[in-house]
Image: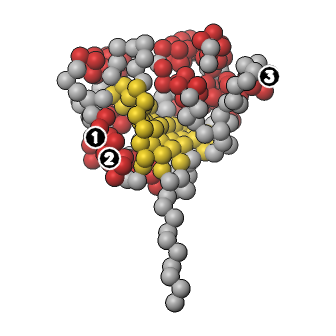
Amino acid sequence: MTGAFYRTLARDAARRYPPRDRYARHFAFGKLTRDPAFRALLERGLLPREGALLDLGCGQGVLVALLLAARESHARGDWPQGWSAPPNPRRMRGIDWAPRDVLRARQAAGADAEFIEGDIRSADFGRADTVVALDVLHYIDFPAQEVVLARVRAALEGGGVLLLRVANASRSLRFHFTVAMDRLAMAMRGQRFPRLWSRPAAEWRERLAALGFAVEDLPMSEGTPFANVLLVARYHPRTPAPSSPS
């Protein structure tokens, strides 16, 4: 995916927010162009072509805004020749606890997606084929993380994929810088969390494997000073063995 074309997509996504909300527009463009996860989701084909998409901790809905911009670009014939068609989920939903962000997400998506103000520990996930959770689970404690992961698997009952981006906890300077920048971003939004609940990537893989996921690691810090990794966790329900004839 060429850099120039992706920046155009990011700009189109940012323009979905009201012109009067300059913060939302600047934040969306900056997030989409500086955070490698969003481009990777498109470029590496990690989002299934169709199905139901659930975005946990969706914030102001920049992922959905990007997918809608990609859909419109493809429909206009602007999509680069030879590229696979962009994801076109039949249903897109997002959940976030911040009312202002949920309102912004609704303004950007209109009737093309549903955004719910709620707590991911208890909000109804419904049925999904793809669940995205970028930099969200470390805001809740370890027991609550276990609850959310189990609820994600239940939402993927028929099979699907969880795209989980986490900070790889360690003693490295990169990890400590990641935590510091996370806290700074929360403070700038007027948010306060007494503790961040991070785990090493290996521990995340173990937790997901115990729930029946097959997990692949993708480094997700390219071009940044952060210690992030994207866990691509695929869930395929086991088919019950046929019963023996009597």
Badge 2 local density, few (<14 within 10 Å), some, or many (20+)?
Answer: some
Residue position for label 1? 203
Above or below, 216 against 212 in this view is above
Q: What residue type is labelled 2?
A: Arg
**Could you say whether the residue bearing mark 1 is in a helix, strand or loop?**
helix
Q: How many labels does the image show?
A: 3
Q: Is residue 180 visible?
A: no
Residue position for label 3? 76
Mark 3–mark 1 Cα distance, whole angstroms, equals 44 Å
Q: Is residue 58 visible?
A: yes
Mark 2–mark 3 Cα distance, whole angstroms, equals 43 Å
Badge 3 local density, few (<14 within 10 Å), some, or many (20+)?
Answer: few
Q: What residue type is labelled 3?
A: Arg
Q: Find the residue positioned furthest to the front.
A: 245
**Could you say whether the residue bearing mark 3 is in a helix, strand or loop?**
helix
Q: Which residue is drawn at 40% across and 34% down?
A: 217
Most foreground residue, 27 or 138: 138
- Image position, residue 88 (x, y; %): 68, 36
Q: Are marks 3 and 1 in contact (CB under 8 Å)?
A: no
Q: Which residue is drawn at 50% across and 54% down?
A: 236
Mark carried by residue 25? none
- Image position, residue 78 (x, y; %): 76, 18
Question: Quadrant location of the N terminus?
Answer: top right
Asked if residue 164 lies left or right of residue 82, the reply is left
Query: Reading the chain from its start, which is encountered first: label 3 or label 1?
Result: 3
**Could you say whether the residue bearing mark 2 is in a helix, strand or loop?**
helix
Badge 1 local density, few (<14 within 10 Å), some, or many (20+)?
Answer: few
Mark carried by residue 207? 2
